Image (cartoon, rainbow, N blue to C red):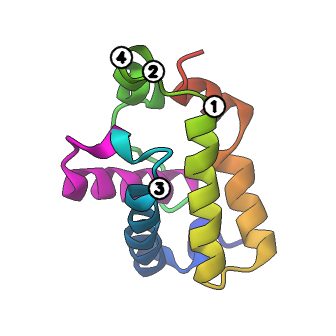
Amino acid sequence: MASLYEKLGGAAAVDLAVEKFYGKVLADERVNRFFVDTDMAKQKQHQKDFMTYVFGGTDRFPGRSMRSAHKELVENAGLTDIHFDAIAENLVLTLQELNVSQDLIDEVVTIVGSVQHRNDVLNR
């Protein structure tokens, strides 16, 4: 059975989605302040690595844990559910613009929007 990563189109699809996604995120006044001092080339690569991992393209994630990566943003910049939801919304819009089928979008949302993932990002 093909992984979600393969169903989405593999590395080329993830690369394109991440580029479009961050275009939306950086234009979104609800969340763009979190990326002001961010090296976006590194951030995009982290996101590609994360998506590749969580969608089944590899069994190893080379980055920090979600808790560790977002801890400072929660403690010092006020990262909350509102921001998590805005990021998720931008991801869904990106996938819709890329004509990803609704069933695959639903699989993506199940993974990245899970309670466990939200709690990890928001350090709960």
The stretch in magenta equals 34-55
Kind of residue indicated by mark 2 = Val
From this view, report whether residue 11 is shown above or below residue 83.
Answer: below
Residue name at image x 50 percent, y 62 percent:
57
Q: Which residue is mark 3?
A: 28
From this view, report whether residue 59 is shown above or below residue 90.
Answer: above
Residue name at image x 31 percent, y 58 percent:
44
x and y, in percent, of residue 48 in the image:
39, 59
The residues bearing labels 3 and 2 have C-alpha atoms spaced at a distance of: 19 Å
The residues bearing labels 2 and 4 have C-alpha atoms spaced at a distance of: 6 Å
Q: Residues within 10 Å of mark 2 (few under 14, many from 20)?
A: some
User: Regarding mark 4 in the picture, which secondary structure is present there?
Assistant: helix
User: Regarding mark 2 in the picture, which secondary structure is present there?
Assistant: helix
Total marks placed? 4
The residues bearing labels 1 and 3 have C-alpha atoms spaced at a distance of: 15 Å
The residues bearing labels 1 and 2 have C-alpha atoms spaced at a distance of: 10 Å
Q: Which mark is drawn over residue 76? A: 4
From this view, report whether residue 35 is shown above or below residue 119.
Answer: below
Q: Is residue 7 visible?
A: no
The residues bearing labels 4 and 3 have C-alpha atoms spaced at a distance of: 20 Å
x and y, in percent, of residue 31 in the image:
46, 44
Q: Quadrant of the N terminus?
A: bottom right
Q: Which callout, 1 or 4, points at the residue further toward the start of the chain?
A: 4
Q: In the image, is 47 to the left or to the right of 89?
A: left
Kind of residue indicated by mark 4 = Asn
Q: Which callout, 3 or 2, points at the residue further toward the start of the chain?
A: 3
Q: Is residue 36 magenta?
A: yes
- Tell me if label 2 and label 4 are in contact, CB under 8 Å: yes
Q: Which callout, 1 or 2, points at the residue further toward the start of the chain?
A: 2
